[in-house]
Amino acid sequence: MMEDRFTRLRAVIAAWEAREAERGKEFRDLFERGDGPAIRRLMDEMRMLRRRRRALEAFVQRWAESQDSLNHPSARSPF
C-alpha cells in the first residue's frame, strides 16, 4: 500500500521531468523569435517546476528509504 503511493509519486516526478523537457524546447523557440517577456514567464515556470520536482524527489527518497529500512528483516521484532 505505501509502496503504491511511492510508485504514484515517482510517476508524477517522471511527468514533471517530461514537462521540463517540453518547456526546454519551447524556450528555444521563444529565444529564436526574440520574445523576451514570454521567455521570462517560461523561465519562472521552469524554475518553479524544477523546485517542486526536486522537493518531491527528496521526499520520496527520504520516506521510501525509511520505509525500506522498516521492512528489512533485521528491523522486525523477533516476538
Image (tube, rainbow, N blue to C red):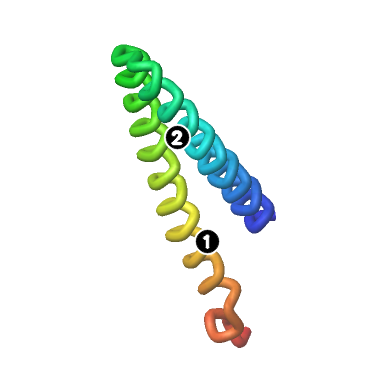
Q: Which of 69/7 is in front?
A: 7
**From what the image shows, is residue 48 above or below residue 15?**
above
Q: Which of 70/13 is in front?
A: 13
Q: Mark on residue 24?
A: 2
Where in the figure is residue 70, as x and y percent of width and height? 54, 71
Residue type at numbered disc 1? Ala
SS assignment at label 2: helix
Quadrant position of residue 28? top left
Q: Mark on residue 44?
A: none
Residue at x 34% of width, y 27% of height: 43
Tell us which disc is closer to us: 2 or 1: 2
Q: Which of 72/79 is in front?
A: 72
Where in the figure is residue 1, as x and y percent of width and height? 70, 54
**From what the image shows, is residue 44 above or below residue 58?**
above
SS assignment at label 1: helix
Disc 2 crowd rating (10 Å Cα; few below 14, some 14-19, many 20+) is some
Q: CA distance from mark 2 to mark 1?
A: 30 Å
Residue type at numbered disc 2? Gly
**From what the image shows, is residue 38 above or below residue 10?**
above
Residue at x 60% of width, y 83% of height: 73
Where in the figure is residue 58, as x and y percent of width and height? 41, 53
- Residue farthest to the front? 32
Q: Kindly indicate whether the residue at mark 1 contacts the one at mark 2 (C-beta within 8 angstroms).
A: no
Disc 1 crowd rating (10 Å Cα; few below 14, some 14-19, many 20+) is some
Q: Report which residue position mark 1 lands on.
A: 64
Residue at x 60% of width, y 73% of height: 71
Residue at x 45% of width, y 24% of height: 29
Where in the figure is residue 47, as x and y percent of width and height? 34, 33
Quadrant position of residue 42? top left
